[in-house]
Image (cartoon, coloured by chain):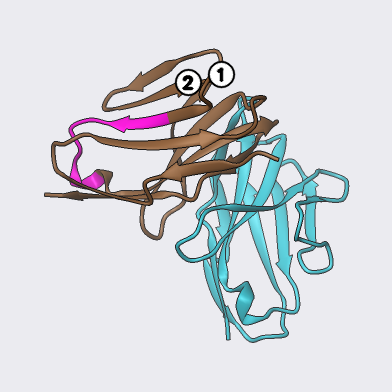
Chain colours: A brown, B cyan
Amino acid sequence: GENVEQHPSTLSVQEGDSAVIKCTYSDSASNYFPWYKQELGKRPQLIIDIRSNVGEKKDQRIAVTLNKTAKHFSLHITETQPEDSAVYFCAARVRSYIPTFGRGTSLIVHP
Amino acid sequence: SAVISQKPSRDICQRGTSLTIQCQVDSQVTMMFWYRQQPGQSLTLIATANQGSEATYESGFVIDKFPISRPNLTFSTLTVSNMSPEDSSIYLCSVGQDSDKQYFGPGTRLTVT
């Protein structure tokens, strides 16, 4: 089955800096890559996603890049703010609707 | 996206008992799922709740322990049976929409003593 590795497990940045979270996947048939943000005590929220026919997608301060050859995708957050502090999960999907999740990255943005 | 609610939001239960968690969606959805998230951990799929038929369980999860119902396209239940402290976790339902996207309910925080 699919295996998703996510790094780093913890990321600490100063407000205004950029943050990058990286994931790799094992199954070359994976075709959909969502990212979720989970604040403490809250549900995971879908913040951005990308399909395998696209190399990059942006939404305001967040962007996701995909390198199918390397089986690697990344989340980029620019101009980080304290409210960006949360756990971020990447995922890769082969079967319809059912993604395999990474272990999560705890992002801490210091004011 | 669909509005998803879960009941109860949290509960404290004694070992050996069972708890049924309800998931309600405000619109009909094709796919509904149940996940477990242990403290500080990632999301683990328990099963896909199939409308009108038996749920499809992932490796390591069995129907006797986690019976699931899905009587219609907006509602599902997950029962955690014969609970032990190892079942203490957050249980999340999720729904699939727009052919790809998956959205999560608020979760049920279960503590087994």
Amino acid on which disc 2 is placed? Asn
Q: From what the image shows, is residue A63 above or below residue B76?
A: above
Q: Nearer the viewer, residue A56 or A83?
A: A56
**A19 left or right, relative to B104:** left
Q: Chain of mark 1?
A: A
User: In the drawing, does residue A8 fall left or right of residue A4?
Assistant: left
Residue A41: give x, y in percent of width and height.
40, 60
Circle 2 sits on which residue? Answer: A67
Q: Tell which of A31 and B57 is nearer to you.
A: A31
Three-letter amino acid code at disc 1?
Ser
Residue in the image at 65% along x and 64% along y: B21
What residue range appears in magenta? A74-83
1 or 2: mark nearer the eye: 2
Crowding at dot 2, Cα within 10 Å, few <14 / some 14-19 / many 20+, comes out as: some
For numbered disc 2, what is the local secondary structure? strand
Relative to A90, say whether A96 is above or below. above
Expressed as whole percent of the image width and height from the top left, the position of residue A53 reads 55, 13
Label 1: element kind: loop
> In the rendered structure, are the residues bearing label 1 and label 2 in contact, judged by CB atoms less than 8 Å apart?
no
Picture quadrant of residue B80: bottom right
Q: According to the image, label 1 marks what residue?
A: A52
Label 1 crowd (10 A; few <14 / some 14-19 / many >=20): some
